[in-house]
Image (cartoon, helix red, strand yellow):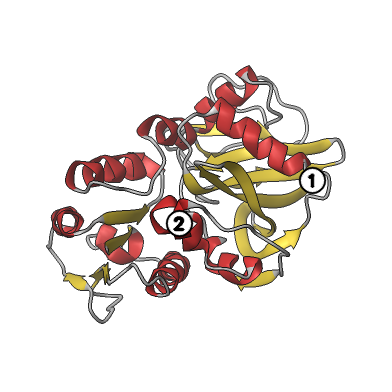
Amino acid sequence: MRVFVCEFVTSGGLRGATLPESLAREAALIRDAMRRDLAALPQVREILLAADDRLPLPGAVAVTEGADAWAIWRDLARRADVVWPVAPETDGVLARLVEMLRENCPRVLACDPEAIAAATSKLETARRLAAAGVPHIPTFTLAQAPDLPGPRITKPDDGAGCEDTRFWPDGVQATPAPRDGLVIQPFVAGEAASLTVLNAPEGVRLLTVNRQHIAVEDGRVFLTGLSVGALADADGRLEALAEAVVRAMPGLHGIFGIDILLTDTGPVVVEVNPRLTTAYAGLGAALGLNPATLLPPFASGGKTQRVGTRTPVELALA
């Protein structure tokens, strides 16, 4: 089996732009974890890769200045039996990438286009969760927002991670830098966390509950690290929340993430990430097994392994 690991940032998706060091480091963490897990599988005989030549990688097809990264990825997808992509949702990149890959490879490990499109928009995510009765943070466009009391958060409707996310204290008018597609939310007090979720043929499984380490500097919100598998779900409430999100947003497949807040009144969904998140870099060590074996193409005998005790794994991102 040939598997093409197509991680957007390290594979040359930003070759024509400045490459932020922190973004490249986080992307490499995910890519290298995917490579390591696939290399341990006996049925995988070759891992195909592309690499931004500013981030050289032995054995990878180099994406040089002026090269068409998408054309290179298309060629690699045609050579592969399976493609495993990761990309940011911003500007519809993930949706376009999955569509292109599905046109060129028989099996792409990704969420369905409808689910990606819905999760890409925080407004649409909030609308679907509200319709399904799933607890979430109310989300509004800047133009249509009511007079929200207390502190607030602004962010891009289609942003990934903490991109352009700002905190506005109570009494301070929210005046983010002008750009299209910003949304505003009330600030909700609680412990920042994320769910790493598997939706496979056997059903939805909560793999880990991860503590997010969030910092605010001059109003800008940053994710500085993760404690993968650090939090428990003793009563099954968080797995039930993940199942409710999947019902509300059909087409979420494979391993993906859900950002949540653990509040005094219960968990609240912040957003849905229809792809691998940075937590994947610590997932194998936290679970004590190879996470790739949880995915149908690589599962032994067609059935995914059971997950036992979690061991917390620290990931520093800043």
Q: Which mark is residue 129?
A: none
Q: Position of residue 53 (x, y in %)?
A: 23, 74
Q: Residues within 10 Å of mark 2 (few under 14, many from 20)?
A: few
Q: In the image, what residue occupies the spot 46% across and 60% down?
A: 300
Q: Which residue is mark 1?
A: 190
Which SS class for mark 1? loop
Which SS class for mark 2? helix
Three-letter code, disc 2: Gly
Q: In the image, what residue occupies the spot 16% across and 53% down?
A: 74
Mark 1 and mark 2: span between their CA atoms?
Answer: 42 Å
The tag earlier along the polypeptide, 1 or 2, is 1
Q: Residues within 10 Å of mark 1 (few under 14, many from 20)?
A: some
Q: Nearer the viewer, residue 31 or 91?
A: 31
Foreground: disc 1 or disc 2: 2
Residue at the outermost right position: 264
Q: Position of residue 224 (x, y in %)?
A: 62, 65
Three-letter code, disc 1: Gly
Horizontal side of 306 relative to 191 (left or right) equals left
Q: Which residue is mark 2?
A: 301
Q: Position of residue 47 (x, y in %)?
A: 28, 69
Residue at the outermost bottom position: 58
Q: Nearer the viewer, residue 293 or 312?
A: 293
